Amino acid sequence: MALDIVRVLGALRSDVQFLRTLEHILIERDTISWGSNSATARCRVMGMEGTFLLKCYFRHRRNAQAIYGDRFYHQEFGVAGFRGRMEYADIALLDWIEGTPLETLLWREDADYKAFSEAFDRLALRTLKSDGAHGDIKPENIIVKPDGEMELIDWDAAWRPGMSSYDAEEIGTFAYRHPLRDDTNFNKHIDDYPIALISTTLAALAIDSEAMLKFRNAENCIIHPEDAIQGKDPAVRHAIELFEQVGDAAHYRIAQILESIFTSNISLPDYIFHASQPRPTSVPSSATLAKEWHLYGLRAGNEWVVPPLYDWVDEPKNGVCRLTLGDHFFEIGVVDAKECSEANGEAEAEANPSEPPL
């Protein structure tokens, strides 16, 4: 049974609270907002340290306990019903993440798309490596913190190990999920398509924001999944061309996922990993051609020195190595193993200034 939204909001704004296990929640009333499933506010809780995000649900969420654990309180917050009858809402107390939604920052004139792209790929890699899945990744559920790093919020649609397709309560936002996803596609891979979509969008904006922004529609979407899986989305086609022209093989492969009819992609974590790493500037003369699935790279011993992302790679010869991506090819230098390690270490240090070169 759903609680009346107006009465829930009134209870959040009231000085009088009826709580079953907690002592008192100090709610910052000017932060109260609401959506279709819950009302939220910034708060502090008597007896607990820190600042929290309070989520007060309008109806019971059967997955909330599995998702939030001891941060979830069943029938905790009192809401006065009709004729004074007290009803109790489920709530969750989550860590407050300071920052600004990516959705707000994306369309500003001073938007730093390169920084957004790099930060999102790091977030995507952490998410894909985790045991669960978020279930509704989109710009408004991504917080850009003051240090530029990103965090996900609103995990209500999350998948956790042990859940089955029967447990799905939501199937993500239409503009970011795979068009063929339904409540039977509830597993570890539900984030694959939205991650590929946002990674592609941000990386393409970082290369040519003027051209990519021309595809933006009234709903603030640049890529349209229903057109993309048919190979008819002009933004995806243009992004793939951009990545091919500049030699961004990782995002080139990520963008191709958007045109797949499959709702999951086992190669995505590898592509995202390579997207978050600096591109090789040189290869050792001892590197040899290697193939993984249908793509080519170069190996030196057990290590990939050129990741397997290319349509073809020539083995080092006459001081150069040619990498083929689509209709374009690129040449990088060939040096001895020590010089290669130093050169690529310097590139990594520039990409990750807080980390020393290998």
Image (cartoon, rainbow, N blue to C red):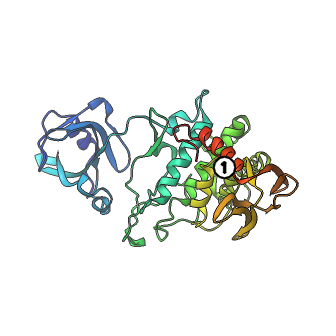
Q: Residue at x 82, y 50 (%)?
A: 330
342 vs 209: above or below: below
Depth order, front residue of 60/284: 284
Residue 123: percent from the left, percent from the top? 50, 48
- What SS does tag 1 mark? helix
Residue 75: percent from the left, percent from the top? 18, 54
Which image quarter: residue 62?
Answer: bottom left
Residue type at tag 1: Ser
Q: Residue at x 68, y 61 (%)?
A: 259
Residue 42: percent from the left, percent from the top? 29, 36
Q: Residue at x 57, y 66 (%)?
A: 264
Depth order, front residue of 207/354: 354
Q: Residue at x 38, y 45 (%)?
A: 35
Which residue is disc 1 drawn over?
341
Q: Quadrant of the N terminus?
A: bottom left
Residue 155 vs residue 209: left or right? left
Residue 134 visible here:
yes
Residue 178 visible here:
no
Which image quarter: residue 98?
Answer: top left
Residue 87 vs residue 241: left or right? left
Depth order, front residue of 224/67: 67
Residue extending furthest right? 318
Depth order, front residue of 144/180: 144
Residue 22 vs residue 190: left or right? left
Residue 141: percent from the left, percent from the top? 45, 45
